[in-house]
Amino acid sequence: MKIAPNYLNTIIDELNMMVVVISKDNTLISANKSMLEFAGLSLDDIKGEPLWDLPWLKHDPDVQNKLMFALSDSYFGTSSRFNASYKDRKGLEYEIDFIVKPVMNEDEPEYFICMGYNITELVQARKALTDRERRIKAFFDHSNEGYFFMSLPDKIHKDKVNDQIIQEMIEHFKLEDISRRFTEIYGKKAECAAEIFEILSIEEPLEEVLKKMVENRSVTYQITFDVNGDVKHTEVVLVGIYEEDDFEGCFGIVRDTTNQVEYLEKITYLAHKDYLTGINNRRNFFTEGNALFDLSKKNKSPLSLVMFDIDHFKRVNDTYGHDAGDVVIRDLAKLVDERICEKCVFGRYGGEEYILVIPHPIHEVYKEFETIRSMIDKTMFDEDHVPIHITISLGIYSLDLDRDTLESGITKADRALYESKSNGRNQTTIYVDSIHGDSARDELTGLFTEQSMRYKLNKTLMDVKAIDDTMWVIYFKLNVLKEDRLLTERRHFKTIATCLSRSIRNSDYIGRVGKHGFMVVLRNVNMKQVDDKHQRMIDNIEIGFSGMIGNVLTIKTSILNVSRYKNDDQVVKEADKHLEAI
């Protein structure tokens, strides 16, 4: 048989205690008749008010603090108890014992029930007890913490405590009382003082613990231990009991902080780690990466940066769905994390991009990650029994610890990564300043220098052979027939560079070869597409030079399919040979 809500409310109203219901947002939901009569208010006057603005709390910050700590414990699902002085509507002071109990829903507090008992008469009666007796009674009767009390047969003056006295104290401590809560926390019973110290498991020698307690009047330890396979965390406070300067015993306070520590660990983890992969998030990567950077700089030890991302990751999402994409991102991070050293700093840089700082020379890092890249190429990532194949592209940079910062190093590793992507993906590129840095570009035209162009030619040739792709070059050679003050050779170079740059795709590139040569590299195109691009370039050049071709300068061009050429020297020689035949 169920009790109807109106009868239930009547029963709560008639209880000889004060009952308040508080929302998880700390506003008043309801209060029973005893509470409202005590405060001299109606429910309509205060319903929905913030807890701290309620009349019976406004006058006393100490009460507010006690309630705040009780509610904090309740958010972790723990009932709390405290007593405090309150004034009723007539200004009379009462002692109220309050219990705060959370009502949980799936490990989250839904609301809090606060029940108050009028213990004024009990408090007044206890005032007749000695200070020590009242303190001990409060410890044992009104706390969710574990307590014990030890005494000595004789008092010892604080200044007379030495190592010998400490040893005698250990032998003569008498366990006067111990709370039930202490036994609950540790899962063990203690019959004497020696067993108490053994159960506490303080790592510091007992003689040092007691010496500190006597000198400072109290000492606090954070202790982690195992109870039947479960890890527990406690805060242990040992407090000396004195009559003036005479030491006569101690009491201990034990707080079970397991929920708070685990919650803090969880919050700390979420603040530092990427939610999907479990590796460092971007912010913590910079924190730990800069720490490793500073250490390597101090020790003058090598430090390398690696950036990599998943090739064509959008295709994975589009083909298999975003859940499958998340599985690939997570499992790829795990695969790499299992194969790097503990000193590496590994993080998710964003999306499908990852970053590492590795305290090894760059040649070792290159070899290691070429192995990893090859392994990934051979691995099938599984999502709901559907195999997914991916590849990665990488950029690697050896940090100059005297000139670089972590941020400037990332910029250079990213340029090397871009080179890997531009050259066909599924490959590793080492950043070289003369090839990938600002000096890789010709100062006059903004095109790649000959050194950088030849490097890129060789990498592209290797890549097209590996995947049986096509590669074409269009070679232009400029011959200036006459110059004047306005139409200089330098101006002609800038003009032709502009005309060619407007005619290519992002995957194509242009560089200078010799003093008068310009070479355009095209990948994955057929002959017709090459002819169309060549014609577009010629048209742009004719527009750019406005009738000067044949009059002020001449331009020769040749088109070559270089897919099977061996190296950059062969490409340049064959291109020059074609031009000479024109």
Image: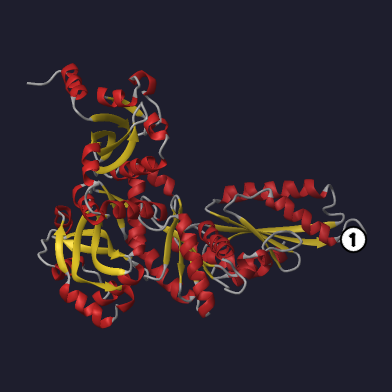
**Whether residue 50 is situated above or below residue 124 in the rendered picture:** above
Residue 100 percent coordinates (x, y): 26, 38
Q: Residue at x 42, y 35 (%)?
A: 59
**Quarter of the figure that contains the N terminus:** top left
Identify the image's colour scheme: rainbow, by chain, secondary structure or one colour. Answer: secondary structure
Give the residue at mark 1.
483
Question: Which residue is at the far left?
Answer: 1
Quarter of the image with the C terminus in it? bottom right
The answer to which quarter of the image holds residue 374 is bottom left
Relative placement, left or right, of 83 versus 195 is right
- Answer with left or right where residue 458 lies relative to residue 8: right
Res. 381 visible in picture: no
Give the total of numbered labels: 1
Residue 527 visible at all = yes
- How far across and how far down the image is residue 403, in percent? 62, 71
Residue 558 spot, x, y in % from top left? 67, 59
Task: Give the crowd class for mark 1: few <14, some 14-19, many >=20 residues within 10 Å.
Answer: few
In the image shown, does 434 or 12 lie closer to the viewer? 12
55, above or below 388, in the image = above
Q: Position of residue 307 (x, y in %)?
A: 48, 61
- Farthest front residue in view: 128
Q: Residue at x 20, y 72 (%)?
A: 154
